[in-house]
Amino acid sequence: MTQTEPNRMERRCGQRFEYQLPVTLRVPADGRRGAGFTQDLSSRGALLWTDFPLCEGMMIEMTLVMPSEITLGEDMSVCCRARVLRLEPHRDKEKPAVAVRIEHYEFLHDQVPVLQQHTPVQVHTLP
C-alpha cells in the first residue's frame, strides 16, 4: 500500500466554520492597514484571503463580525490579535491565503459592526 500524501496531524482545537466574512487588518508594529476575507474561522484561528503583505510570525489585528455559532451568543464585532502561522502561495491569480492563530479577543460592544462600516451612510446637515 502506497500513500501519496504524508500523514498530517490535526492541530485545531475548535470546530472550523466555513464563513466568508470581510475583515480589516492592521499591523500594530507599523500601523499599516489592509483588508481581506475569511475562508474559514474558529474561536482559535482563521484562514484569510488577502493581498495585504504579511509575513510568517507577524502579529496582526483582525477586526470582523464574529458569528453567533462561535460567540455562542449573538453576532458581535470583535478585534482579534492574531499571529500569522503560514502563507499559502497564489493560485490562478487569487489572493494568497494566510493562516492565523487568534491569541486575544476584544469585543467591540459600542462600535458599528465591520460590515456596516463599508456601507455608505447618508449624512444630513442642518441649515
Image (tube, helix red, strand yellow):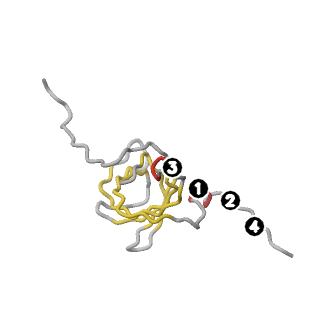
Mark 1 touching mark 2, by CB under 8 A? no
Give the x, y percent position of residue 55: 32, 61
Q: Amino acid at mark 4?
A: Val
Label 2, residues with CA under 10 Å away: few <14, some 14-19, many ≥20:
few
Disc 3 is placed on an element classified as helix
Q: Mark 3 vs mark 4: which is more N-terminal?
A: 3
**The C terminus lies in which quarter of the figure?**
bottom right
Residue 123, numbered label: 4
Give the x, y percent position of residue 9: 21, 43
Residue drawn at (38%, 64%) of the image: 104
Residue drawn at (52%, 53%) of the image: 22
Q: CA distance from mark 2 to mark 3?
A: 25 Å
Disc 2 is placed on an element classified as loop
Q: Mark 3 vs mark 1: which is more N-terminal?
A: 3
Disc 1 is placed on an element classified as helix
Residue 64, numbered label: none
Q: Which residue is mark 2?
A: 120
Q: Which residue is mark 3?
A: 68
Q: Which residue is mark 1?
A: 115
Q: CA distance from mark 3 to mark 4?
A: 31 Å
Q: CA distance from mark 1 to mark 4?
A: 18 Å
Give the x, y percent position of residue 65: 52, 55
Q: Nearer the viewer, mark 1 or mark 2?
A: 1
Residue drawn at (36%, 53%) of the image: 45
